[in-house]
Image (tube, rainbow, N blue to C red):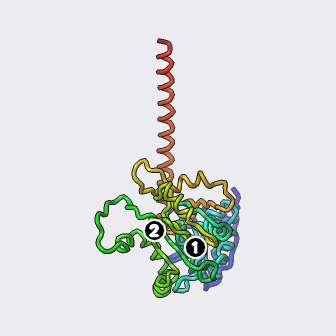
Amino acid sequence: MSIMETIIDIPVEHEKNVFGQFDAYAKIIEKALNVTIIARNGEIKLVGGKEDVERAKGVFLQLLELSKRGNTITEQNVNYAIALSFDEKEKAIVEIDKDLICHTINGKPIKPKTIGQKKYVDLIREKMIVFGIGPAGTGKTYLAMAMAITAFKNDEVSRIIMTRPAIEAGEKLGFLPGDLQSKVDPYLRPLYDALYQIMGPDAYVKNTEKGLIEVAPLAYMRGRTLDNAFIILDEAQNTTPAQMKMFLTRIGFGSKVVITGDLTQKDLPFNTKSGLEESIKVLSKIDDIGFSYLTSQDVVRHPLVQKIVKAYDAYEERLNKKKDSDQGRLKKIRKINYKSEKIR
């Protein structure tokens, strides 16, 4: 394998952002792409195999461009840029960064951070109903919330309605104190948290008092028709088929709907079918309904979360293979027994 060298200019003001604290990001790139990085006087020299050096150069240039756009580089950005470099899509990371949805109350920009998230956001813009399906940490609910608040501020809809099934997540909580709203609030807390961060508590309270923003359990949707609203159904894997049908038939004119869920985290009673799972099969051929499938590559939480999701996916895949293998053996045994009975 021929060894090559290349030099990249990294302006001093961007060096710390691109390299990370204690050169942490440079070390990740060195290890992942099998290159040697030598930094000196605003320049970095990359040494290694031709393909490895080209990949590393592409990653650094993308991170530098992100830094020039005012982004604080994270480990997730570095890992994702490396992953894209193997698919020769490293330039996509800068294209994704151009899509600004809105700002939080503190002025932080909200943007998709992966190709999967970008496709998800584009689908929400194009379709009337969108299903966002994927593991924890892929930004399904947060991005949907940002899109809802943007549509509300731009007068594209007159109100925002957020709902989720009030179901215990593997724990028996018993009789909770307080009125009905107090009892269901713990189930809706993630929605409140996202609202406060993007819109701010004051704006949320003001719009809630006017009835323009509503956060409610799914059971409250029965018997209503929801016109000119942006509606988000969160944790949809915990709906029953009847609940999902009820929700989907509430949608009125001028409304947009985003349904989010993670099929690997169902909290339904044993042997109860998920409404989300059934709706994917029933509605997949309807043009005005979009399905966005996010994966562990789209996880934007701590890098460890991505590793946990991948580990669980691999474990479940092994279990399914074993289950299929066991069922195959059982069928063969039944077939042999049937033939033996016939011979007798």
Q: Image quadrant of residue 61?
A: bottom right
How many marks the image carries: the answer is 2
The picture places residue 170, in percent across and down from the top left corner, at 36, 58
Tell me: 181 left or right of 152. Answer: left
Q: Is residue 242 left or right of residue 100?
A: left
Comparing 179 with 96, the one in front is 179
Q: Are marks 1 and 2 in contact (CB under 8 Å)?
A: no
Q: Residues within 10 Å of mark 1 (few under 14, many from 20)?
A: many
Furthest-top residue in this view = 344
Q: Which residue is drawn at the image coordinates 51% and 38% (left, top)?
A: 324
Residue wearing tag 2: 220
104, above or below 112, in the image: below
In this rendering, does residue 158 appear at all?
Answer: yes
From the viewer's perspective, is the residue at label 1 or at label 2 nearer? 2
Which amino acid does the dot numbered 1 rest on? Phe
Q: Nearer the viewer, residue 70 or 155?
A: 155
Query: Where in the figure is residue 79, as x and y percent of width and height?
Result: 57, 66
Mark closer to the chain start, 1 or 2: 2
Judged from the image, the secondary structure of the residue bearing numbered disc 1 is: strand
Q: Secondary structure at mark 2?
A: helix
Residue ID for mark 1: 230
